[in-house]
Image (spheres, grey):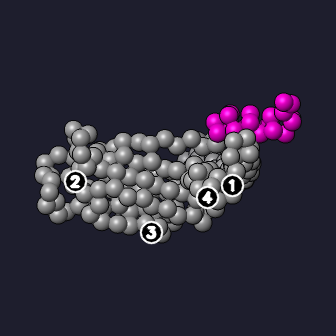
């Protein structure tokens, strides 16, 4: 059976396009018994984000001590907060681009765990297409096989396009900042040069007056 060029391109995008999207893998971190441990992620605006977290004891055999979790936006707005949990999920849609923080701390009241040791926490940021439940989509829209693969490829291409647009906007923004900074540095350099020349002229004038007064010249 012949495969149309559109379908062929779609399958290739599905196979390799994900590598062009921001890849975020699950991370493990140790939360101390006192203080706060934060992780951050650079995320653009209008992106669906799902944050999964789970606490495990140091032996990796069972759920560990409970923690308090807080997620904030780049401007400090609280997007998610919960206390005294061992696992959970935070879901939100970003309204601005920037650095999003997820901060964890050991819960102060541990009735079933000792606070002598730190807690191990697994954190997994999921964004964009990774947050979709494709099994539910396939059942709801009654699609499968190649049609489902093309649908995934379309979503990946849309994500790549949005990411490229975001990078272009960031590039233009940073270029504008660099040009403004260069202009300010040039103005400051001219001011410094003018000040140096002015001080030099005043010094020469003052020394000339001094020598004339002492009749040295």
Q: Which mark is residue 142?
A: 1
Question: Can you give x and y, in whole percent of width and height, for residue 63 in the image?
Answer: 25, 49
Secondary structure beneath dot 3 equals strand
Residue at horizontal 45 percent and vertical 61 percent from the top: 90
Q: Left of 126 or right of it: where is 204?
A: right
User: Which residue reaches farthest bottom?
Assistant: 77
Mark 3 and 2 residues: CB-CB less than 8 Å, in contact?
no
The relative height of residue 43 versus residue 1 in the rendered view (above or below) is below
User: What are the residue bounds of the magenta stretch?
Assistant: 1-20
Identify the residue shown where x is 29% and y is 60%.
85
Of discs 1 and 4, which sits in the foreground? 1
Q: Residues within 10 Å of mark 4 (few under 14, many from 20)?
A: some
Q: Earlier in the sequence, mark 2 or mark 1?
A: 2
Circle 1 residues within 10 Å: few <14, some 14–19, many ≥20 = few
The location of residue 132, given as percent across then percent down, is 59, 54
Q: Is residue 136 magenta?
A: no
Asked if labels 4 and 1 touch by Cβ distance under 8 angstroms, the answer is: no
Give residue 47's mark: 4
> Based on the displayed image, in which of its 4 quarters is residue 5 positioned?
top right
Q: Which residue is mark 2?
A: 65
| Tags 2 and 1 touching, CB below 8 Å | no
Mark 3 or 1, which is nearer the eye? 1
- Residue 97 visible in the current orientation: no
Of marks 3 and 2, which one's residue comes earlier in the chain? 2
Q: Which residue is mark 3?
A: 78
Residue at 80% x, 34% y is: 8
Rendered location of residue 148, percent (x, y): 69, 46
Q: State how far apart marks 4 and 3 are (Cα).
A: 17 Å
- Cα separation between marks 2 and 1: 43 Å
């Amino acid at each position: 059976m012949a495969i149309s060029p559109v379908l062929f391109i779609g399958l290739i995008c599905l196979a390799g396009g994900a590598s062009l999207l921001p890849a975020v893998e699950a991370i493990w971190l140790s939360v101390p018994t006192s203080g706060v441990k934060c992780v951050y992620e650079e995320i653009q605006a209008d992106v669906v984000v799902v944050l999964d977290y789970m606490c495990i004891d140091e032996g990796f055999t069972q759920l560990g001590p409970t923690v308090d979790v807080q997620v904030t936006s780049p401007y400090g707005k609280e997007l998610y907060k919960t206390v005294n949990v061992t696992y959970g999920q935070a879901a939100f849609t970003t309204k601005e681009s920037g650095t999003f923080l997820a901060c964890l701390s050991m819960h102060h009241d541990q009735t079933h765990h000792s606070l002598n040791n730190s807690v191990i926490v697994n954190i997994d940021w999921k964004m964009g297409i990774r947050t979709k439940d494709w099994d539910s989509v396939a059942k709801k829209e009654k699609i499968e096989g190649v049609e489902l693969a093309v649908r995934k490829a379309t979503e990946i291409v849309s994500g790549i396009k949005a990411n490229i647009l975001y990078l272009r906007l960031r590039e233009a923004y940073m270029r504008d900042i660099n040009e403004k900074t260069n202009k300010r540095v040039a103005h400051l350099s001219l001011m410094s040069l003018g000040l140096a020349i002015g001080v030099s002229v005043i010094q020469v004038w003052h020394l000339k007056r001094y020598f004339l007064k002492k009749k040295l010249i």
